[in-house]
Structures are given as C-alpha cells and as structure tokens.
Image: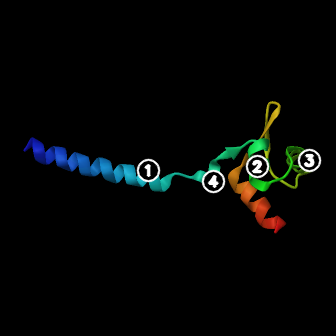
Amino acid sequence: MPDILTSILDGVRQVVREELERSKRPVDETMTIDEVAALTRYNPATVRRHLVSGKLRGMRAGRKWLVRRADVEAYIGSRT
C-alpha cells in the first residue's frame, strides 16, 4: 500500500512541476540598459536617451533603469 501512495504522490508532484513550468511568465523579466543595448545593438547612451524621451518604456530603480523584456520586444517590433 505505501508503494501505491508513493507512486501517486510522485505523479502528482510531476504534474505540479509541469504546470509550474508552463505558468512561468518570462514576459516579466527585467533588463538593464546594458542588456537592452546588447540585445538591440544600440549604444547604452542611445538606450538611455530613448528611455528618458519615452520612446522605450522603462522604470527607474534608484539611479538605474529597468526595462521589461516585453517592452524591449515591442520597441524592437516598432522600429522594424
């Protein structure tokens, strides 16, 4: 009997792991100016200027800028 319960619990754990993997949202990943610059192949100063002007959406965290990956992808899509 304990072996049956163990196998049922293992199955439930596997299903939960798979659901958690499917539900992860990489859209919420944030990037720094340097990471955005590397991805877009723009100079970091250009990325900063686009953030300040509002061409690229981002948020300030102290002295640093953070940009959601979804906003970077939307920005790249609008530039092409």
Disc 1 designates what residue?
Answer: 20
Kindly report which numbered mark, 4 or 2, lies closer to the viewer in this rendering.
2
Numbered-mark total = 4
Disc 2 designates what residue?
Answer: 38
Cα–Cα span, label 2 and label 1 = 30 Å
Disc on the earlier residue, 4 or 3: 4
Residue 66, how many percent across, how many down?
A: 75, 42
Disc on the earlier residue, 1 or 3: 1
Q: What amino acid is found at the position of numbered circle 2 in the picture?
A: Ala
At x 90%, y 44%, the residue is: 45
Kindly report which numbered mark, 3 or 2, lies closer to the viewer in this rendering.
2
Cα–Cα span, label 4 and label 3 = 23 Å
Disc 3 designates what residue?
Answer: 49
Residue 21, how many percent across, how many down?
A: 45, 52
| Secondary structure beneath label 1 | helix
| Secondary structure beneath label 3 | helix
Q: How is the image coloured?
A: rainbow
